[in-house]
């Protein structure tokens, strides 16, 4: 049984979404679903996560005077989770929050991380409609922080890359594994990640739910048909062969959800990432 | 054209569900969908099942003073179907009803059956929250009946096994084909079943709709993302290389369904199982 | 950037549907979704289709005294699109409209086309319940027009063929790639199409949304579980190795849709077919 | 145990090969290998073919004054095998012998057959270097015999088609499943065959060993790397869903073989085709 | 770098082969190839096995008065290897030697092992042509030793099972994963093994080289075309999720080999099994 | 028909091999096989390469006083081929020759190339046993030439990487797609290459025949079982989506070959690379 290995942080933010509001309501709803009697506490890998999580509360956008203030609070929370010896998993909120989270993770570690980003969009816009903190821009912001934060970004599931997006990817050495070229089997995707990720950097997983096909995750702001199955995503995560240093699950939009189906996908991702972290720390001695 | 080969029994029961009510309403709704003008009467295997079914009515939980009484009625119905030379297919209801059905099938045959269980959960709890008849326990009950009822259980699609579930599986010689290890192609799953099922025992199929991913079957009480596609399930069933002696489709919960999508999955499963039975009896001389 | 390469025609018709009304409302809704801010203008193949479409308006069933009159209007519109040097993509409406469209395309070209039909049903009924213009019959009508209209029909995703349907397929030399035998990978499906389609005829794509599994496209009148993933369909289309001369996307039924998910699938299909047309005309010199 | 179901004919001929001699020596060597103690008598499908074969002797090219005389002898032998109620399997010899064999089979049946040809080459040359009986031409000769002999030819594994070969395929309605587009899994290939073969015609299998990669079958005159695995070929044959009316295994060239490896592949093909014939006749009531 | 983790034992024996002599010469040749300058010392998993092996010499059949005496010597060697804290890997010799090896392993452990047997044949004959020690019988002999030696046998790659072989498999609870049903991807085979092997027993790997297709391993006495690729075998071994307690590689017949190709396959298997053992002992704490 | 598009250069060199001599004899033998009557002139892509090649002769190691002199001659030949408007394809020789070839190609282009290297070994040794020109070191030499020669190296099929090899790969930003993680389908491998190769650099293909399994290519000095199938390699090459600026096929060792099987693989690779070059230059406008 896993005991207090994860610090679970919610961030109720969606002002930097470009199309719909909704993700700000996500953290509370996902946490509620995690406590649902519909589930038992076992992961597919056989771990029991009943006592794995310490709830680090929810950071609410409305409590802050500015995005910068909110970012500072996010960084403080992430740092305190790591200082307590736990691994941070954050429930978004829109995707822009990955920027302060990853900066805090790398700062606390004192070295850069690799990022595996599951997403339909590559989120590398220099800015989106003038908003540098847009949910379409977090990874541009992360690379601006320089080589001490992120040493490699691999994107999985992309299916909407613009010319600008491709130029930004080339500029920052980002590898886009586009949906049209992705193998069907998540275990093979994991093998591709193994070839692409540096051997000596821990991995941060950033999971935008719209990486999945809308059939599997209708509760997102941007429906992009032709996405991953939940199964392929879980298999890819389970088979990542690097220590996992943190993760987020973002862009859940309850206003589009159907009977809570997508919230449950978020819960499943948290549970299986937690199980993989447990395995990765045991096997790989981080 | 198939004539009166199947006895179709409904069981409107959900008291032994652990989380939500709803499956008791399923039989009437699925039967109504089977008569829908939206469909023709042909299976994918080319059989016409317009006259394949004799409706054996619905057994309603509310009509009985106890679970034991209801079980007796289920057994009587299954026995009368088989005595009429028909193959029983039962529409649940929650999964606990598989216990009396399989006991009746084996008793009528005078020999044990193999069971192929499609499910997210292994349903082998000794009891669940004190309920020995819980929908989480039917296969434990079946094995308690001893070797004359079930000689082998193979579970397909499991993704929530607890330590207790695994111990029970080991205790009863059950093979769990967990979702995380399942090939994508249903024909390959059928090949695995061929290796695992005894050559000389007929097969009973118990299909819990939550074996499927919630994208394909949202109308179930327990959403467990990462499940089978309907396609893989149909392919696996079509290619089972044993005589099929009976089947059930359980755990449809209309309260969670979306425009009747899951009811239609149940209809499809009944039709394709019926077609496979027709083929299996013709080819294999049961 | 693609400039005015596609003439986009809507046909608001559903009187020849056999089960539900609804598709008549589709063209306006899909066109609205195409303008949604939720999307950018890039296809998966990297083309930007912001200026690719010229809207040829919507033909509305209610404006015509007879089906024949409506067909004449459809043919006029398709002919005017092609005369303007554009490729016609039509948004249905029920499937019966493919008949006048393909007749107009072949007449304008002065030679027959091959058709790739994605569909759960083979739509080759001599007539359906007495309606020769039924949405279950368009391809019988097309073959009646003789060898100058269609030289080969390949159907992808069939899972409900009746004896009559199979006889009609044999009569007209139609190849049915049934869902039960289809490979999982759309690229492999494209290879099969390459073997089956004549080398020297351009291809018309007719996409009935019920080719897809109801999980991916709930917004259709006839739910037939066990269908294609959106991904497999997109991969098959992208890899078609023939010039594409026109296309339709039909049978969207908004009354069954869930948060516009299926409308967005229609939008995606239009975008990726447009991108494939651009590539096919550049590479293959039509 | 299968009893006398197959008439096994050898044809020691290679004058119509275009490159190397050698196949004339094949029949005796393959028959010897069939009797080897290295093997037991069971097929992968579980049949025992110890008593399945009646040896119809070998027809030797050298005994005839002309190709026409030899063809007459081949036809007589095939007719006598079928008259005895057996299924003919012929061991070549070069591929040109398929022409008289198939003519005799169709004549005895009184109706045309479908042919499934496994081959690296499509063997549809009008003639090859002036030889109308070339081993590169048998299927052109078969189609010249008109619709009473062959109603459909599907070719599997082609990887050398010339422009002329493609024109001939188009002329005769032949479907080439080229190696570059073939799925890896033989079961999927069988599904493609099911879509392509007429429902009501029995199937004749013509297996040129160079359909296989030279790694699996070095003992052929023409090495064409990039071919099928023996496994994929066996899986495709096992899953053919039509009655099999006859077969040949041709173009074994012992002068290129390595420790008899290719002879053993020929033996395996005969055994598994025999097993499939047994299954197809039992299941499909020919 | 792995240091002295493996005791490498040769057994030069082939009197109990049923068809050809040759395997007695194998151990010396394989060991010579292991020292070849053609190779470096790294496995695919990244381990360096330059100093991994302690050579335990070769046991030569000719030195013993009886099979029983030789078995005693084999058991002594295996026991001494394990007593030295090493894992035994044995180079055959014919397959009959697995019997004394496994008995010694289980005796030293004091508990039964699971066996994963890669093989074309199931080697469960009660006896073969009167020889109870035949290379076709070792697993029958092992099961006769009772539940303290072997708790589960899973066979991978079988393609020649006789009725007697199948009865023996049923009698001893053996699972045959037959070649005709095996997935192409070795990682998926490993998932099947995970479902079939008891959780709490260490695994012994017995690798008969004829599990592989003769294209990959021509140097065996019995060519059975249609076998595994070397790649699939390596992938299956790498992904076994149980501690590996020992292994053998048997039935190399140099008289059939081609430029030492099969000897090198044996070397590769030893290296990759060694690497997997290192990983399994590190990860799984045996 | 392709006319004089390729300059075909032989390099008869093997002094820098580390284990066996033999590759120096390769160019003449492969060229002879290209003229064999066993083949026609068509590629799998449908091109006719009868007149595609201009033979640029063979450079023989023995004619030069030093490796440096030979390198100068190789560079001259490559430059003259490109100056004549042809694409250079070189037949090795051992792998060390790729170093001068690629330097000449980039110099003539005036910009760096991407390299796709098919190989069992990563050939990035700083030096091998003191030989800086070892066949185990060409890519280290290439990277020493700085960013004007090679902007990205992707290696396909690696299965022997040492710690030093991995460090060199990290140092030079090389991506190793190791055999243990490679998908079975070459089309999927091509998709991976598309994600990894820069969009704006032409591709040079360096094909070491030991990338293939020894079953497919026995004629190499270093047998490394578990390699690619010829089929997967051909599919990967056909689907490369970049202009191809040159290629080599190296390390054929006739002393290990079996009936010329591996020479024919070399011929096939040259033919299919030539066909892909024709397609890439037509489609992609280099």
Image (cartoon, coloured by chain):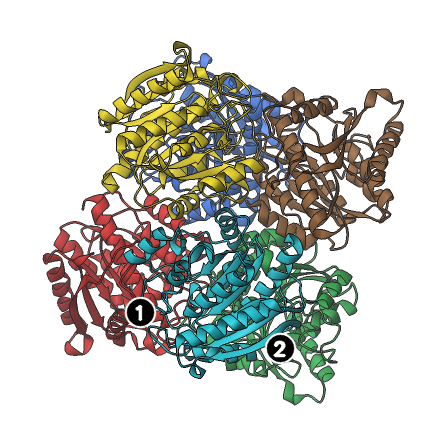
Chain colours: A green, B red, C cyan, D yellow, E blue, F brown
Image position, residue F194 (x, y; %) = 67, 53
- Whether the residues at callouts 1 and 2 have beta carbons within 8 Å, the answer is no
Q: CA distance from mark 1 to mark 2?
A: 35 Å
- The answer to whether residue A53 shows anywhere in this view is no
Residue at (67, 81) in percent of width and height: A16
- Number of marks present in the image shown: 2
- Crowding at dot 2, Cα within 10 Å, few <14 / some 14-19 / many 20+, comes out as many
Task: Classify residue C271 by image quadrant.
Answer: bottom right
Q: Is residue E191 left or right of residue F27?
A: left
Chain to which mark 1 belongs: B
Q: Is residue E2 left or right of residue B87?
A: right
Tell me the number on the disc at residue D177. none
- Crowding at dot 1, Cα within 10 Å, few <14 / some 14-19 / many 20+, comes out as many
Chain to which mark 2 belongs: A
- The answer to whether residue C242 shows anywhere in this view is yes
Task: Locate the N terminus of chain F and report the quarter of the image it occupies.
Answer: top right
Report the residue marked by disc 1. Answer: B251
Report the residue marked by disc 2. Answer: A94
SS category of the residue bearing label 1: loop
Q: Is residue C88 left or right of residue E251?
A: right
Vertically, is B122 above or below D151?
below
Task: Classify residue D144 by image quadrant.
Answer: top left
Say which of A87 and F165 sits in front. Answer: F165
Image position, residue C270 (x, y; %) = 56, 68
Say which of D100 and E198 sits in front. Answer: D100
């Amino acid at each position: 049984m896993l005991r207090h290995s994860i610090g679970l942080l919610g961030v109720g933010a969606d002002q930097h979404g470009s199309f719909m509001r909704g993700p700000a309501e996500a953290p509370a709803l996902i946490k509620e679903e995690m406590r649902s009697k519909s589930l038992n506490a076992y992961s597919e890998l056989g771990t029991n996560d009943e006592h794995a999580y310490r709830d680090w509360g929810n950071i609410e956008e409305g409590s802050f005077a500015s995005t910068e203030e909110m970012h500072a609070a996010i960084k403080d929370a992430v740092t305190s989770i790591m200082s307590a010896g736990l691994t941070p998993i954050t429930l978004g909120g829109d995707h822009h929050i990955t920027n302060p989270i990853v900066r805090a993770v790398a700062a606390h570690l004192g070295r850069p991380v690799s990022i595996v980003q599951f997403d339909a969009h590559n989120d590398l816009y220099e800015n989106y409609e003038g908003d540098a903190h847009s949910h379409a821009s977090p990874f541009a912001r992360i690379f601006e922080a320089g080589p001490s934060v992120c040493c490699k970004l691999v994107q999985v599931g992309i299916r909407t890359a613009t010319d600008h997006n491709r130029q930004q990817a080339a500029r920052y050495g980002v590898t886009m594994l586009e949906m049209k070229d992705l193998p069907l089997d998540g275990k093979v995707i994991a093998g591709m990640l193994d070839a692409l990720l540096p051997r000596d950097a821990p991995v941060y997983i950033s999971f935008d739910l719209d990486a999945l096909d809308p059939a599997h995750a209708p509760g997102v702001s941007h429906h992009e048909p032709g996405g991953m199955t939940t199964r392929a995503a879980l298999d890819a995560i389970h088979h990542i062969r690097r220590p996992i240093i943190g993760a987020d699950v973002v862009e859940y939009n309850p206003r589009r959800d159907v009977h809570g189906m997508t919230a449950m996908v978020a819960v499943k991702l948290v549970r299986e990432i937690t199980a993989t972290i447990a395995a990765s720390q045991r096997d790989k001695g981080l």
